[in-house]
Amino acid sequence: MIKPFLFLLPPEKAHYFTLFLLKIILAIPLIGTLYKKRYTIKDDRLKRKVFGLDFENPVGLAAGFDKDGKSFKAMSSLGFGFIEVGTVTPKGQIGNPQPRLFRLPKDQSLINRMGFNNEGVDALVNRLKGGWPDHLIVGGNIGKNKLTPNETAEEDYVICFEALFPYVDYFVVNVSSPNTPGLRDLQDKEPLTKLLNRLQVLNKQKTNSKPILLKIAPDLTNEQLDDIIEIVETTKIEGVIATNTTISRAGLKTNPNTIKSIGNGGLSGRAVRQRSTEVIRYLNERSKGQLTIIGVGGISSPEDAIEKLNAGASLVQIYSGLIFEGPALIKEINKAILTKIPQPSVAQVSNS
């Protein structure tokens, strides 16, 4: 009902207004309770144990929606099994100049060049200290500051890892955003292996180590994806999130002049669905099913989520689909998982 109004607002303002509205709704006792019941589904058959963690259901909120941990408690009321906060950097930064988020309604997609805008890891930690609802899994997506050169990028990831360690259930190393200059160079085999090994050394020194995952771009070649599989095996991280946004503009229905006027940025939403699924399927097949994958990219319907699970993902995440389809999408996906996937093949458990 409010979507037409929200789409009259600039995308970034609509985002913050929607979260503000959600918090107001949840604060009203009776309405808040009814809202939660409407959008959540509880069923033991949806539970998953993946990389050692117990998920209430396999549908999560992708990183980028709640960078600073201001809204993850409210968003959990929409029925997510897990929520990923961040990407967070050691120091707060304002990100790229606005406008930096653009809707492509004809493609049900978004282009963003946010640039890791966030208040810094200490601010996120302070919010996470307040805890969160029982059974909700919270992941921390970590990155480097824009002004940090790649030669010392490891230190930024270490700072975020150490600060967040007591307060998140798993980590995601983000080296695949196209909106921080030079960041994707860290996806190359040598620097990436070095970075992940550094984090794993620290991880293993903890009393209880936590899963570390790598978020990868959809623009990698098959040879680069083979390297990713090898890197995961070598560093013994728990798996990958496939995929981040793409720099490709192929196949868009939106007027090319409009796309040109928007400029640089990562493309997400329905336009990246096919490539994201291709990457998931390739990684799953080449690893002979031994690689744990969270599938994200272009999930706008229950069928899209089923597609990624069938391609080899153990869990899925949504972001752009939530913008265009609304919060009912989460419940619809979970209902489809119960009815469209044979139960034995749904209960995917990490071998890591």
Image (cartoon, helix red, strand yellow):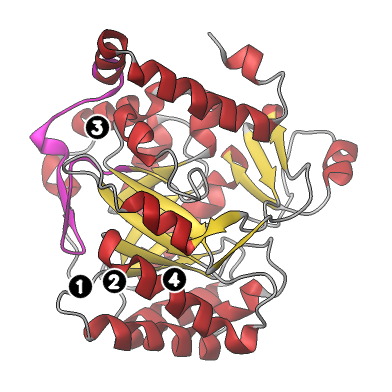
Q: Residue at x 54, y 37 (%)?
A: 320
How crowded is the residue under tag 4: few (<14 C-alpha within 10 Å), some, or many (20+)? many
User: Which of label 2 and label 3 is nearer to you?
Assistant: 2
Q: Earlier in the sequence, mark 2 or mark 1?
A: 2
Q: Residue at x 19, y 31 (%)?
A: 338
Q: Earlier in the sequence, mark 1 or mark 3?
A: 3
The CA distance from mark 2 to mark 3 is: 27 Å
Dot 3 amino acid type: Lys
Residue extent of the magenta highlight: 37-59
Which residue matches tag 4?
160
Q: Is residue 234 above or below residue 11?
A: below
Q: Residue at x 31, y 21 (%)?
A: 39
Q: Earlier in the sequence, mark 4 or mark 3?
A: 4
Residue 261 point in image, percent of width and height: 89, 42
Which residue matches tag 3?
340
Marker disc for residue 269:
none
Q: Nearer the viewer, residue 220 or 96?
A: 96
The CA distance from mark 2 to mark 4 is: 18 Å
In contact (CB < 8 Å): disc 2 and disc 3? no
